[in-house]
């Protein structure tokens, strides 16, 4: 087997913590991955991995070897892409995960422009609002909103999304039009709560006007962990909801949603492209991130 095949297999086993998971992401059999690791350990004459029945852990020597190999493989990819007699356009496979509304309303409609510029990049696009294990699932980057707290990730700021409060005309006809955010706590009103897919915790936002602050913590009848379904619930008149402008724009223009509380503001939601901090940012990932930043600047 090629030495670099052995190294790539080793990196995936370390990151996935499992020979089976590594084999799945490499499109290899588990036996082939096991053979590659055995050949690598025989070559370097050092035990790189501890195998148990439940998980594979890297040894102390293996951790040192991993840190060097993961950067070397990324640099090799950049080197090969930049050879004078090779096409200069970045090429290869990128695994990306983005929120569902961002995918359907912004990213996917813009992809023809991306492929016109980078026809040799293959995107494997995961569409979800769940927390993604970038290392274990071998994902190159994610687009996410909110404050990033995972210290294993590096991130690039993409945009600040302006949030506003909306409700469907049918809801307002039934419950009445609130003129102050505190009225949402009254028995006649309810919200649609958006909650984290992994944490199960509801998101609460504060509305501010001058020196006055009101937290949108009203009673809910429905909690949802998917952005597209959350929007659909608001359109169906199931409660008041808060949305970034890009999600509400078309519905407001069609008269399907009404903006509430003019003069009140919600702090913008930062949007990031995040990727594993310990990985070298290869050329194809770098141009994808640059493109996302560019097209989001045009959307602002």
Image (tube, grey):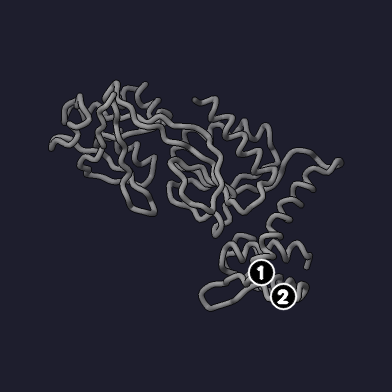
Residue under the point 53% across and 78% down: 53
Q: Residues within 10 Å of mark 1 (few under 14, many from 20)?
A: some
**Residue 219 image-quadrant placement:** top left
Name above or below for residue 149 compared with residue 256.
below
**Mark 1 touches mark 2? (CB < 8 Å):** yes
The secondary structure type at the circle numbered 1 is: helix
Residue 46 — which label?
2
Q: Residue 120 — which label?
A: none
Q: Position of residue 175 (x, y in %)?
A: 16, 31
Q: Is tag 1's residue or tag 2's residue first in the polypeptide sequence?
A: 2
In the rendered structure, the answer to whether residue 281 lies left or right of residue 174 reads: right
Note whether residue 23 is visible: no
Residue occupied by mark 1? 62
In three-dimensional space, the C-alpha distance between marks 1 and 2, rounded to whole angstroms, equals: 8 Å
For the point 59% across and 62% down, which residue is it? 15
Most extreme residue toward the bottom is 53
225 up-or-down from 235: above or below: below
Relative to 14, 181 lies left or right: left
Q: Is residue 253 left or right of residue 92?
A: left
Q: Which residue shows up at 45% across the image and 40% down it?
A: 145
Is residue 82 at least partly visible in the picture?
A: yes
**Residue at the (29%, 42%) spot, across then down:** 193
Left or right: 40 with respect to 57? Answer: right
Q: Quadrant of residue 37?
A: bottom right
């Amino acid at each position: 087997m090629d030495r670099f095949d052995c190294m790539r297999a080793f990196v995936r086993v370390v990151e996935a913590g499992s020979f089976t998971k590594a084999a799945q992401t490499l499109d290899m059999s588990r036996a082939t991955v096991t053979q590659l690791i055995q050949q690598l350990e025989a070559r370097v004459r050092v035990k790189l991995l501890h195998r148990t029945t439940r998980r594979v852990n890297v040894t102390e020597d293996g951790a040192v070897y991993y840190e060097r190999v993961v950067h070397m493989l990324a640099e090799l990819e950049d080197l090969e892409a930049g050879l004078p007699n090779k096409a200069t356009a970045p090429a290869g496979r990128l695994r990306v995960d983005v929120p569902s509304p961002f995918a359907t309303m912004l990213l996917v409609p813009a992809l023809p422009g991306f492929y016109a510029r980078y026809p040799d990049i293959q995107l494997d696009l995961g569409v979800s609002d769940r927390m993604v294990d970038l290392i274990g699932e071998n994902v190159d980057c994610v687009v996410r909103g909110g404050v990033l707290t995972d210290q294993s990730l590096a991130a690039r700021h993409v945009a600040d999304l302006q949030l506003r409060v909306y409700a469907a005309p049918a809801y307002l006809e039934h419950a009445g039009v609130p003129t102050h955010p505190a009225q949402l706590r009254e028995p006649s009103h309810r919200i649609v709560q958006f909650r984290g897919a992994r944490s199960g915790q509801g998101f609460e936002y504060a509305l501010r006007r001058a020196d006055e602050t009101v937290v949108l913590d009203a009673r809910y009848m429905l909690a949802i962990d998917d952005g597209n379904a959350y929007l659909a619930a608001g359109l169906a008149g199931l409660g008041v909801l808060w949305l970034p402008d890009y999600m509400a724009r078309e519905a407001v223009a069609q008269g399907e949603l009404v903006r509430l509380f003019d003069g009140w503001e919600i702090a913008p939601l930062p949007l990031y492209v995040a990727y594993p901090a310990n990985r070298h940012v290869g050329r194809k990932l770098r141009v994808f991130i640059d493109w996302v930043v560019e097209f989001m600047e045009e959307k602002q």
